[in-house]
Image (cartoon, grey):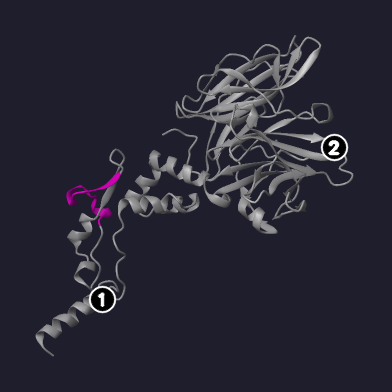
């Protein structure tokens, strides 16, 4: 064999030259994510810790022998695009791959991008539902929303609730950007992201509680201040026109402060406020002399101002007291009609009364007794509605007016539920 053939054979044995690493070339490839320029930058070899340096592969390594080629180089932008579409559980593991991936995944820009893509994911890819059981002990489970729509049986996971009091059932206030909010004895709140297992408990409210009093909460996001806020409306029906005292908790400052009270004569019901378009919305009772009206009161979380949101023209005389919910990012209103149907309205353009549309009317099965449907938790692309009836989840398909009862393995009988998105948003400000 000629010397040229020997060289070709040797190159084939050791692999292509551009795929082989030397100690110097591996050190030059070490990079770190620059938060200002939104890109990875090369680090000089002298700035790399000796323990973090790559080592040259041994001569008998499979890569050195050309048996396993190195992966091609991926641009920083492509790495970011791939990672931003992955579930949180994978990203938490991938932070350990290298320093630059940990730096990228922990960056606030990446967290916001992942939040946006997860919220907009089709078919509820990143959405889960948390379920509070009806057992004596306070047990929480979680499962994928997409599985409830597509499978007759769904696997659930036990959640480790941060506040240890197994015989006290804390109420779910709501969810926002992956954060769940719980009311703890109406005196404080817990902000918790179960996807990353990080939580924060607020200081006590300090209200002067007495029998008959209650607190209506609400969780939302102030996009101008980039701050998550919880509003607590303390209601005392023992005084004339039901006095209200409103406080707002800022996650950034970790403190409560007093803001303007509800308009005179307006008292929210005990149900939590619903967050839509930068505002929290409560169903409320407006007392004007002997008359009493059902109204929707909205609080702008940034300006901290109130306004009324007008409901649609509906069958007031023959329906139950309406409740509020959120579907597809829009405010919705629900009520029982003659105890024969559960009616859901949707406000397509927030604040515009003419944009209300009757979304669905769900029939009650014969002899519904004293049970009512819960507010709808979500609605699929093809119109299936997920809600609860008699402590079980129900799927209603308006196309053929059929009902399905998805089974959750390892649990049955639910007291409360809330849909949330798996995100990297932390209740603890860094």
Q: Pick whichever of labels 2 and 1 is earlier in the sequence.
A: 1
Tell me the SS state at disc 1.
loop
Q: Is residue 278 left or right of residue 58?
A: right
Image coordinates for residue 86, horizontal then vertical, percent: 46, 53
* Residue in the picture at 62% in, 38% down: 164
Image coordinates for residue 190, horizontal then vertical, percent: 58, 32
Mark linked to residue 65: 1
Give neighbour class at mark 1: few <14, some 14-19, many 20+ (Cα, 10 Å).
some
> Magenta stretch containing residue 52, yes or no?
yes
Residue for badge 2: 339
- Quarter of image, res 367: top right
Using the image, determine if residue 8 lies above or below residue 291.
below
- Quarter of image, res 1: bottom left
Magenta segment, which residues? 39-53
- Quarter of image, res 226: top left
Q: Extreme front residue here?
A: 354
Using the image, determine if residue 214 lies above or below residue 373.
above
Q: Is residue 315 left or right of residue 179?
A: right
Q: Quadrant of the C terminus?
A: top left
Q: Extreme right residue here?
A: 367
Q: Is residue 135 visible?
A: no
Front position in the image: 32 or 59: 32
Front position in the image: 60 or 173: 173
Mark linked to residue 299: none
Q: Nearer the viewer, mark 2 or mark 1?
A: 2
Image coordinates for residue 270, horizontal then vertical, percent: 71, 26
Question: Label 2 vs label 1: CA separation?
Answer: 76 Å
Tell me the SS state at disc 2.
loop
Q: Is residue 74 left or right of residue 402?
A: left
* Residue in the picture at 57% in, 26% down: 279
């Amino acid at each position: 064999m000629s010397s040229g053939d020997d060289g070709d054979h040797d190159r084939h044995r050791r692999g292509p030259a551009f795929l082989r690493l030397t100690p110097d070339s591996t050190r030059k490839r070490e990079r770190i994510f620059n938060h200002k320029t939104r890109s990875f930058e090369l680090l000089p070899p002298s700035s790399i810790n000796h323990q973090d340096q790559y080592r040259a592969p041994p001569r008998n390594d499979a890569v050195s022998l050309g048996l396993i080629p190195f992966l091609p180089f991926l641009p920083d932008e492509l790495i970011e695009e791939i990672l931003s579409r992955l579930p949180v559980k994978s990203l938490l593991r991938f932070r350990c791959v290298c320093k630059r991936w940990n730096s990228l995944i922990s960056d606030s820009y990446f967290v916001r991008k992942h939040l946006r893509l997860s919220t907009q994911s089709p078919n509820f890819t990143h959405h889960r539902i948390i379920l509070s059981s009806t057992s004596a002990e306070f047990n929480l489970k979680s499962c994928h929303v997409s599985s409830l729509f597509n499978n007759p049986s769904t696997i659930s996971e036990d959640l480790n609730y941060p506040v240890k009091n197994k015989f006290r059932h804390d109420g779910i206030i709501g969810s926002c950007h992956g954060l769940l909010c719980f009311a703890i004895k109406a005196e404080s709140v817990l902000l918790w992201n179960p996807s990353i297992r990080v939580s924060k408990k607020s200081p006590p409210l300090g209200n002067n509680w007495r029998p008959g009093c209650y607190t209506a909460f609400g969780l939302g996001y102030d996009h101008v201040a980039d701050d998550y806020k919880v509003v607590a409306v303390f209601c005392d029906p023992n005084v004339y026109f039901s006095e209200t005292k409103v406080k707002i908790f800022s996650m950034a400052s970790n403190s409560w402060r007093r803001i303007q009270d509800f308009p005179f004569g307006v008292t929210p019901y005990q149900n939590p406020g619903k967050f839509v378009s930068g505002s929290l919305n409560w169903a409320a009772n407006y007392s004007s002399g002997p008359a009493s009206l059902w109204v929707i009161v909205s609080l702008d979380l940034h300006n901290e101002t109130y306004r009324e949101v007008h409901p649609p023209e509906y069958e007031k005389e023959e329906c139950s007291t309406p409740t509020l919910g959120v579907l597809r990012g829009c405010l919705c209103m629900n009520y029982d009609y003659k105890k024969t149907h559960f009616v859901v309205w949707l406000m397509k353009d927030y604040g515009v009364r003419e944009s209300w549309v009757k979304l669905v009317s769900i029939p009650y099965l014969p002899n519904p007794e004293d049970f009512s449907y819960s507010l709808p938790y979500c609605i699929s692309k093809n119109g299936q509605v997920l809600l609860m009836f008699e402590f079980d989840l129900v799927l209603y398909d308006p196309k053929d007016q059929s009902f399905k009862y998805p089974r959750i393995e390892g649990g049955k009988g639910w007291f409360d539920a809330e849909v949330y998105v798996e995100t990297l948003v932390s209740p603890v400000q860094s």
